[in-house]
Image (cartoon, grey):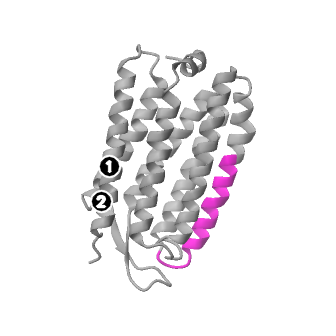
Amino acid sequence: MVEPSSTVQLWLWIGTIGMALGALAFLVMAAREKPGNRWFHTITFFVAGIATVAYLAMALKQGWFPIAREGQAMAEPFYWARYVDWFFTTPLLLLDLALLAGATKEAIVWLLGLDVMMIATGFFAGVTASDTRWIWFAVSCVIFVWMLWVLLAEVLKAAKQRPPEVRARFNQLAVLLAILWTIYPILWVLGTEGLGVIGIGGEVATFAIIDLIAKVGFGFLLLSNRKVLEAARPNMAA
């Protein structure tokens, strides 16, 4: 039976603690707001909270199973809990962006629907041992590009109608997310689920760092400016 190394476990615990501290901070920030003014805080809390649960499961040596892929000499852990995390948290991150931009309901449905499809096909790529995984990976990448197009063509269009400070913060967060999310498929190709160039230790460490920036870092950047949240809030029903 393949067992995660101590280095892998260390990074999983770093991810767990980092996500938990982020979730706690977002909860405290939400408690300082009046009911009805906590939309962004609530969504962002659940992003970090769900990620905490997923990382805790992996740190406790759950949420994974060994898989031997074609072209690789030995079995490596496949962390399916990571995909469960992404299945719920990435739509919430996009919902934060869409609400900040004042996007239409139709654009939000397209954005979140495509994201769910991207994660689902990515999961099938990761769980497939044969070279068929590359077909699933290609499909997931196509959907990712499609989702970015919706973000830039529809959501960005709505953001341009927002007050300058809201528009500027949206641009910062959208660029941050686009850059970080582009790293994921590159890491997938180089990591154990793809070509195996990067070992499981380096893969888990990199995923943990990117996840923390994309969830906790994103959250602090979003919630740190009350003026921006106040300006964005009128278009949101309590």
- Give the amino acid at mark 2: Leu
Residue 43 location (% of width, % of height): 45, 32
In the rendered image, which residue does mark 1 sit on?
16
Residue interval drawn in magenta: 129-148
The answer to if 132 sits in the magenta stretch is yes
**Category of crowding for the residue at label 2, using alpha-carbon neighbours closer than 10 angstroms: few (below 14), some (14–19), many (at least 20):** some
Image quarter for residue 60? bottom left
Q: From this viewpoint, is residue 104 visible?
A: no
147 part of magenta stretch: yes
Residue at left offset 33%, top offset 64%: 8
Q: Which mark is residue 134?
A: none
Residue for badge 2: 10
Discs 1, 2 touching: Cβ within 8 Å: no
Q: Amino acid at mark 1?
A: Thr
Q: Residue at x 29, y 62 (%)?
A: 9
Q: Is residue 67 left or right of residue 165?
A: left
Secondary structure, mark 2, is helix
State whether the magenta stretch is mostly helix, strand or loop. helix
Cα distance in 3D space between marks 1 and 2:
10 Å
